[in-house]
Amino acid sequence: MKTRFAPKGTWPGLAWAGLCLWLPLGMGPALASSPAEIAHAEYEEVMALTPDIDNGRKVYITCAVCHRPEGWGTPDGTYPQIAGQLRSVIIKQLADIRARNRDNPLMYPFSLPRILGGPQNVADVAAYLAQLPMNPQNGVGPGTDLELGARVYKENCVKCHGDQGLGDEQEHLPAIAGQHFNYLVRQFQAIRDGRRKNSDPKMVEQIKGFSPREELAVLDFTSRLRPPAERLGPPGWRNPDFQGYVYPPAPGMPPPEPGPAAPPAPPARP
């Protein structure tokens, strides 16, 4: 299971005009005429930068309201676990969302350069997230058909995501071990139905043949793949970079413990 860049056609004039305001330096209509090409150009630019993790911590303030300071997401699948995700994957998905090569109406406004910052900020926040410890207790499925799930995973997913679901940094193939079951279900369905535009067409065709039972089983099995022990945080871990952060209610999360409020600093911009 993997995603690739693939041209999806040009944007209407007004959208193109607005997007030109934040195209990577030296890039114009002659070099990038589709959302996929625009995203790919930014991905290449960001990957060539040297990340500053300390600045990434400051940039992440923009993201922490939804993803929480720990980056652990929510078990109901509204927000994915992004802590410990491969740096190249975070960069690719941000570039795709910013260019609207991947539809994400909830996240799109926060990903824009005027909020998140330019390519250097993307490089920095991706590096910061990649080194965060992961949730040791992610949401899992019902556990009723794991033998079938293991077989479907081995036959269809190992080649790209690896036998332990750790992904591939060089190929920007996401790590899926430790991801919330409900988020995996949402993304699987979006890929299968063609709603996630940056998906690999081969994967779309491949999973269309899954029966409902196979789909549930393989996603349940995937949610139970464990990241390496050294990548996991302890249960209940709180990110020390956000001391005093007041945790607002979130779907699928227990009520936050009361604590002193600390006004967040504005995100740094390069």
Image (cartoon, rainbow, N blue to C red):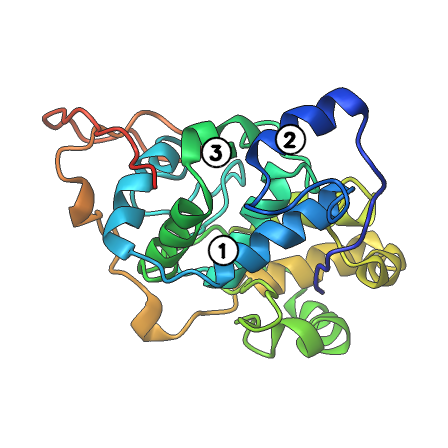
From the viewer's side, name the closer residue of 231 and 63.
63
Q: What secondary structure is marked by label 2?
A: helix
Contact, mark 2 vs mark 3 (Cβ under 8 Å): no
Query: Looking at this view, is 69 or 137 the one in front?
Result: 69
Determine whether the residue tagged by mark 3 lies in a helix, strand or loop: helix
Rounded to the nearest whole Å, what is the CA distance between mark 2 and mark 1?
A: 17 Å
Which residue extends farthest left?
260
For label 1, the SS is helix
Quadrant hosting residue 130: bottom left
Q: Earlier in the sequence, mark 3 or mark 1?
A: 1
- The tag earlier along the polypeptide, 2 or 3, is 2
Does the image show residue 179? no
Q: Which badge, 2 or 1, comes first in the chain's sequence?
A: 2
Res 19 label = 2
In the rendered image, residue 186, in percent from the top left (x then y), is placed at: 66, 43
Q: Given the image, on which type of amino acid does mark 1 rest? A: Val
Residue picked out by circle 1: 46
Residue named by callout 3: 113
